Amino acid sequence: MPLKLRPPRAGKTPNFEIRGTHRGPKGSFAVETSSGTHRRSDALKFLRAIEDCINEHGCWPAPSVPSPDPEQPTFLSATVAYMQATGQRRGMARLIKHFGQAPLAEMTQVLIDKAALDLYPDVAPATRSRYVYIPVSAIMHLALGDACPRIRHTYGGKGKERTDFMWPDDAFRIIAEADKIDPELGTYLLTLLYTGIRKSEGLALLPQDTRPEELTAWLKTSKNEDPRMLRLRQDLAERLRTHLEAHPNRERLFKFREGGHFKHLLLRATMAACGLDCPKRRPTGWKKPKFRLAFVTFHVFRHTWATWLRYYGGADVQGLVATKNWRDERSARRYAHVVPRDDWARVDKLPGSLDLGTERGKAVNE
């Protein structure tokens, strides 16, 4: 019979009792226990909890979970270390709640795939990649290093490749407005623009690794964990020299930290470049208006650097990969499509209306 409540019995127990059987995934499971309460509503809640436990585990009480080995990293400890190292917190709460103290050694592809579907069942595949596969992979790589297994985006997707970039007049107008807000912000944006490094990589630069007199800066780590030497333009080197002299005792080259306020500083500069006013601090419920440079984020400075390097500098795909900003040609090849320099010489050979009736026009028609 199903689980039922037996009322309190005078002289025996003042509480409701729960008796009966409940069918779970492993068959029927018999229960006879006190609810521990004389309130019928609370006893019913306890009964429903017992049914849920049997549905999930096939028994009641639930089997005990062994305590994690303190010497083995868990998903929780690895995630905390990742957030401390990168400042990234977006979406982490849901992952922590789902995986909890699961040992990283037990984080299998099947487990991660199930989490992607359970946490984000009705979203685009690219969203699952962004909020499950990518952060879980980054967390595990930071904790396990080369021992980290390859994580496939089984129910994820690559999403749309973005190749937004700024023309020089827009880029320099934004940097000029950033200088008015905070000269250090302008110097930071110019560093992104002329080195192509990511936002987090720029925040990780160290003063002792920045050598303006040698036109170089050493990036110790990056998103793909490849250190590399950065080449500094002369004008950027001069600004960095002035910046270092003004702040000689810094632990990091730039004072900024990941967060909404940092993003709002860039929004102020982009809106000012379009002649729009922006509050100094983002008010509750405030939404940015639509404007021409609304697409500009910190990462767009990286796209702009790559596009300029190909458009103005004539770099081919191999040249972009050689800068070590990308690990393989697939990531850099998008800029070959944005600026197809190799095909430009053929454009002048296409027939035009002025060729009609000429020897060249006849040759083309033949």
Image (spheres, rainbow, N blue to C red):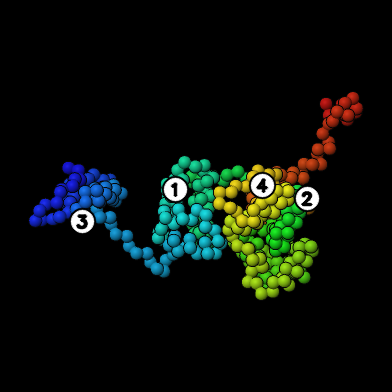
Disc 2: which residue: 169
Disc 3: which residue: 36
- Kindly report the distance in space between the C-alpha atoms of the residues bearing marks 2 and 3: 74 Å
* Mark positioned earlier in the residue sequence (4 or 2): 2
The amino acid type of the residue labelled 1 equals Leu
Residue 339 position, x and y percent, is 74, 45
Q: Residue furthest right?
A: 358
Disc 4: which residue: 294
Disc 1: which residue: 119
Q: Are marks 4 and 2 in contact (CB under 8 Å)?
A: no
Q: Residues within 10 Å of mark 2 (few under 14, many from 20)?
A: few
Picture mark count:
4
Query: Which residue is found at the position 83% from the left and 26% from the top?
Result: 365
Query: Which residue is found at the position 66% from the left and 68% from the top?
Result: 253
Q: Are marks 1 and 2 in contact (CB under 8 Å)?
A: no
* Mark positioned earlier in the residue sequence (3 or 1): 3
Q: Left or right: where does residue 38 sit relative to residue 84?
A: left
The amino acid type of the residue labelled 3 equals Gly
Q: Left or right: where does residue 154 sit relative to residue 61?
A: right
Residue 105 position, x and y percent, is 42, 60
Residue 112 position, x and y percent, is 45, 51
- Kindly report the distance in space between the C-alpha atoms of the residues bearing marks 3 and 1: 34 Å
Q: Under tag 3, what secondary structure? A: loop
Residue 289 lies in what quarter of the image?
A: top right
Query: Which residue is found at the position 24% from the left and 53% from the top?
Result: 60
- Kindly report the distance in space between the C-alpha atoms of the residues bearing marks 4 and 2: 16 Å
